[in-house]
Image: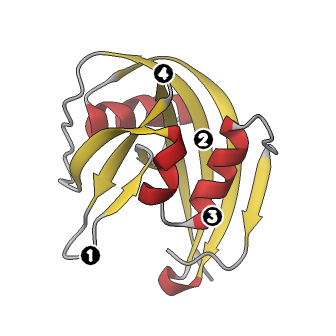
Amino acid sequence: MRTLYRIVVGIVRQGDQLLLVKNQADGERAVWSLPGGVIEAGETLADALKREMAEETGLSVETFELAYVTENFIEQFDAHSLVTYFECTIRGELLPNDPDREVVDSQWVPIEQLGDYLLNRDVLEPLQDYLNKASKSYYLYEQMVW
């Protein structure tokens, strides 16, 4: 039986750019992603989004709106993840305060260059659909490779 991970992710725009964070955990290769993380026990989606954004970027979420949901089965980690994406408006200064010490960098990336940073197509394609107003509300990836 796979472990279920409930994850929340923030999509933050600044003009024609999105905010990405670079994560690196315990000797693994560094990976660019949208800011977000695992929802803690008893935490609402809203509370998790605000906490994760503050930890990974130092920014406070002012408003948020549901963008889309992905469901992924990641065999290499024997994992099943349910990821909820929110578009956010934020305030504050970009200054990560990551207690896990996994965020090693953050950067505003032009939307047309996202494919150079987000190397996992199962993350990139739904985001591009959303940004191009062609989004479905739910995506299922049964053979995701991370």
Mark 1 vs mark 4, foreground winner is 4
Percent coordinates x, y for residue 140 in the rendering: 76, 63
Instruction: Name the residue carrying label 1.
Output: 28
- Which label's residue is closer to the chain start, 2 or 4? 4
Instruction: Name the residue carrying label 2.
Output: 85
Could you tell me how far apart the alpha carbons at marks 1 and 2 are, in whole angstroms? Answer: 24 Å
Q: Disc 1 on helix, strand or loop?
A: loop
Q: Disc 2 on helix, strand or loop?
A: strand
Examine the rendering and report whether any part of residue 14 can be seen. yes
**Eyeballing the image, is 46 above or below 43?**
above
- Which label's residue is closer to the chain start, 1 or 2? 1
Could you tell me how far apart the alpha carbons at marks 3 and 4 are, in whole angstroms? Answer: 24 Å
Compared across the picture, whether 129 is left or right of 100 comes to right
Question: Crowding at label 4, few (<14), some or many (≥20) Cα neighbours within 10 Å?
Answer: few
* Residue 15, disc: 4
Mark 2 vs mark 4, foreground winner is 4
- Camera-nearest residue between 109 and 136: 109
